[in-house]
Amino acid sequence: MSQAPTRRAAIAGAAALAVATQVRAEDAKPLTRLAFGACARQNKDQPIWEAVLAARPDLFVFLGDNVYGDTRDPKVLRDKYAMLAAKPGFRKLKETTPLLAIWDDHDFGKNDGGGEFPMKHESRAAFCDFWDVAPDSPRRTRPDGIYTSTIVGPPGRDVQIILPDLRFNRTTLHTPGGFPAMAGRYIAGKLFRDSAIAGPYKYEEYDGATMLGSAQWDWLEAELQKPAALRLIGSSLQVLSRGTGWEAWERFPADLARLHKAIGNAGNVILLSGDVHYGEITRMAREGAAPLYDLTSSGLTEVWDVLPPNDRRVSAWRGRNFGVVEIDWEARRALLQVRDEGGGVRLSESVPFA
């Protein structure tokens, strides 16, 4: 008889998930409620964890800016992770709920940073140690980042969770004047706050411009060929938003086109994203295929007072929040929600999947 780990043990790279019990894959319990969030400043109170715990997710996904490291000093970064670890709500979440994590710019180490960041290997070591990534995991050693994917649940009700790394190999961002991004949001937020662009960055259309790099692209395209009843792609940056000048997949048109080609006409893909410090549901119509949705949850502690342009926006809410995906396997529908700090539902969309 073939044996497979339980849902907890099967989630590669998650923290504190090792269990002794083994069951057949077809007997594994399907995933029915996933929660996720991003942007948790470690030196702030984090009361939102009470609402997350009350939601009783089967799994929680951290989509980046899990701490605000912003440093080239590995000790400073590790000390900031220790501050997160000391939060009572986070401790209880880790003790009771399987976790998956990817980073964004601040836990990578540089605001709006990419592959040029000289301390990215040290940041990776700190990330992997904090999130209990296995010593022999390729996330620790591969030359192009900490991306990961896992499939949870029995055949026919299995959910693939794909977490690409949008930082380790990303080529340099530029301002509309052609200058490399340096101060990023700290000065550009003021300069562009009232403009139609509402952000500091131009489209990166030069040869070789990429967020993922060639090896990670090969991996991602291969992952999207694996059988799964439902796919959740957890991107640290928004995927479908259109019209913003901030960081997003839109900044890299070739990568975005390649992602859409890799997804194809699949009716079982839902995008999850973070970064922007507000909650949002974005919908993209597709000719000959079901619409594609991007559920954005950000932040767990951070709130921005500006709502940049997005002509695909269904709804948005500014306030501390976390995201929830509830899966109805009988109806083959996913309920996408943004919930507030008290657990109240602020945004909601019911999405069928093939």
Image (tube, rainbow, N blue to C red):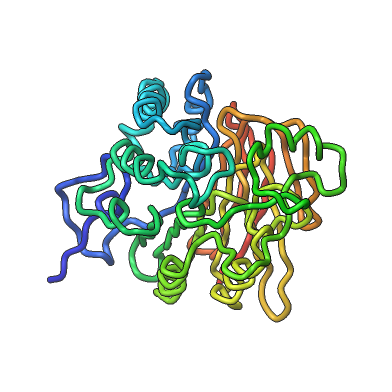
Quarter where residue 219 is shown: bottom left
Foreground residue, 289 or 79?
A: 79
Quarter where residue 171 is shown: bottom right
Q: Quadrant of the C terminus?
A: bottom right
Residue positioned most to the bottom: 288
Count of marks overlaid on the render: 0
Residue 91 seen in the figure: no
- Residue at left offset 54%, top offset 59%: 211
- Residue at left offset 63%, top offset 40%: 182
Residue 323 in the image: x percent, y percent? Answer: 56, 43
- Residue at left offset 44%, top offset 38%: 56
Q: Quadrant of the N terminus?
A: bottom left
Foreground residue, 231 or 342?
A: 231
Foreground residue, 83 or 225?
A: 83
Residue 232 seen in the figure: yes
Horizontal side of 329 relative to 333 (left or right) equals left
Q: Is residue 147 depicted above or below 127 in this figure?
A: below
Residue 193 in the image: x percent, y percent? Answer: 81, 37
Residue 196 in the image: x percent, y percent? Answer: 87, 48
- Residue at left offset 20%, top offset 48%: 135
Residue 151 in the image: x percent, y percent? Answer: 36, 62
Horizontal side of 276 relative to 234 (left or right) equals right
Horizontal side of 309 relative to 168 (left or right) equals right
